[in-house]
Amino acid sequence: MKKPHSEHKKRYHNNNNSRFKGKPVVDYTSEFDNKKLQTQSGDVIELFKMIQAVRYDRTSFQELYNESRQKLNNDRMNLESEVIKLKKHYNARITALQEEYNSVKSNNKLELARLREG
């Protein structure tokens, strides 16, 4: 394992280094033009209406998606419960048939034993 060393190369920074200068201050108020805003206000209003329509559509689609997903989950759970009921029914039927088969088999063995004796 290497030992950490404390001898780092020291860098001295000059005040005229461009990396450490502050960000330039931009005056956005000089670029603002009220006439330009008034000429484009119709476009801005139309854009705002489109944004609102998209937001409304997105929320309605999200609600529809959530409802569909909930319905799908409920349907899946109902199907799983139906499958469980069917499995229980068929297992009970198979058990009954096995018991009937075993009783017939034992009765046949008893009859064969009687016939051999008799």
Image: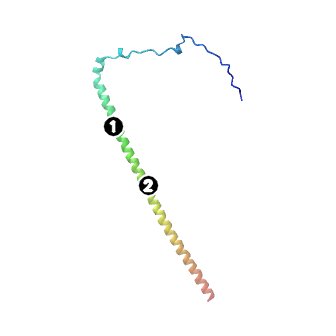
Q: What residue type is labelled 1?
A: Tyr
> Quick one: label 2 or label 1, which is nearer the N terminus?
1
- Residue 29: give x, y in percent of width and height: 35, 16
Question: Residue 28 vs residue 116: left or right?
Answer: left
Query: Which residue is found at the position 60% from the left and 83% from the top?
Result: 112
In which quadrant is the C terminus drawn?
bottom right
Q: Which of 4 and 33 is in front in this view?
A: 4
Q: In this view, does 44 lie above or below 113?
A: above
Residue in view at x 54 percent, y 74 percent: 101
Q: As displayed, is residue 64 above or below residue 3? A: below
Q: Is residue 109 above or below residue 44?
A: below
**Left or right: 113 as drawn, with respect to 68:** right
Distance (Cα) linking label 2 and label 1: 32 Å
Question: At which x and y percent is residue 67?
Answer: 37, 47
Residue indicated by mark 1 = 56
Q: In which quarter of the image is residue 16?
A: top right
Which residue is outermost to the bottom? 118
Q: Which of 32 and 42 is in front in this view?
A: 32
Picture quadrant where residue 104 is located: bottom right
Circle 2 is placed at which residue position?
A: 77
Q: In this view, does 64 lie above or below 2?
A: below
- Circle 1 packing at 10 Å, graded few (<14), some (14-19), many (20+), is few
Q: Locate the N terminus and report the quarter of the image it occupies.
A: top right
Q: What residue type is labelled 2?
A: Met
Give the structural element (helix, strand or loop) at label 2: helix
- Residue 31 is drawn in which quadrant? top left
